[in-house]
Amino acid sequence: MTELEKIARARMYLQKLINGVNPLDGTLLPESDIVNNERISRCLQYVSEVLGQVIENGGTEPQARQREKFSISNEQLAQYPLSEIPLQITEITARINALIDPNRMRQLSANTITAWLVSEELLYVHTHPTGKTSKYPTENGLRFGITAEQRSGMHGEYTAVLYNAYAQRFILSHLQEIIEKQQEKRSERRNPQT
């Protein structure tokens, strides 16, 4: 295997992790997995992009280029493949990101959506005795089609938070608001009030 092939394989693994998929067996990772942390996800996305540029340049260091902030048109959103089978947020985000050009634009993270759902009191954050946190549906969230179910995975039992077709439509209809909220938070972090 050549160095470029190794880099391509590493990038493929990173892209699967970014989309909440176990690269070894193709199963969805639980929402509580560390790769779904917004900061970790952004870091993995950045490394994946750098590896993509190295591949495009035939193995040489890429030239720095800025990608646009995430944005999506109503026409692109109309192409979202709505699922009647409830999906985890990582799958919803992967379907949204499939509608944009990731080489030109930053991708949307699952945490951006779930943070907004927490702010809208459709999800709440539960802190486990270990200090790890998970997000679960509130009573309002349940009414909007967000549910939780126990599943078995590679690392044992976990709770999967699922979004039915109504919840998916709700997220899509508020996506511009979700994006604006994320951009406000980033702006606040970069320019903290003194």
Image (cartoon, rainbow, N blue to C red):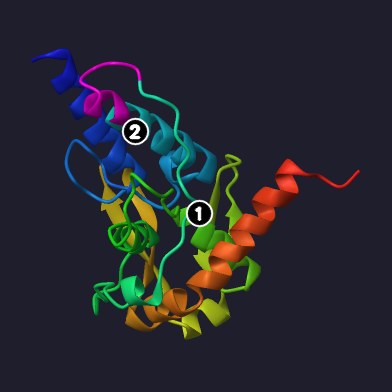
Q: Where in the figure is residue 55, as x and y percent of width and height?
A: 23, 26
Left or right of 2 on screen, residue 75:
right
- State the residue in front, 64 or 18: 64
Residue 66 location in percent, x, y?
Answer: 48, 39
Picture layout, residue 174 above or below residue 182: below
In the image, residue 134 above or below residue 62? below
- Residue on which the image places disc 2: 48
In this view, 51 is above or below 192: above
Residue type at mark 1 is Asn
Determine which quarter of the picture holds residue 73: bottom left
Along the viewing direction, whichever of 175 and 146 lies nearer the viewer: 175
Residue 153 lies left or right of residue 132; in this view the side is left
The kind of secondary structure element at disc 1 is: helix
Residue that label 1 marks: 111
Question: Where is residue 154, by image quadrant?
Answer: top left
**Residue 92 appears at what percent x and percent y?**
34, 64
- For the C terminus, the image quarter is top right
Residue kind at label 2, given as amino acid type: Ser
Per the image, label 2 sits on a secondary structure element best described as helix
Q: Nearer the viewer, residue 88 or 127?
A: 88
Residue at (41, 66) in percent of width and height: 72
The span from disc 2 to disc 1 (Cα, nearest Å) is 18 Å
Which residues are drawn in magenta? Answer: 53-61
Q: Residues within 10 Å of mark 1 (few under 14, many from 20)?
A: some
Extreme residue toward the right, this view: 194
Question: Looking at the rendering, which quadrant does residue 33 occupy?
Answer: top left
**Residue 136: image location, x then y, percent:** 51, 64
Q: Is residue 174 visible?
A: yes
Q: Residue at x 17, y 19 (%)?
A: 4
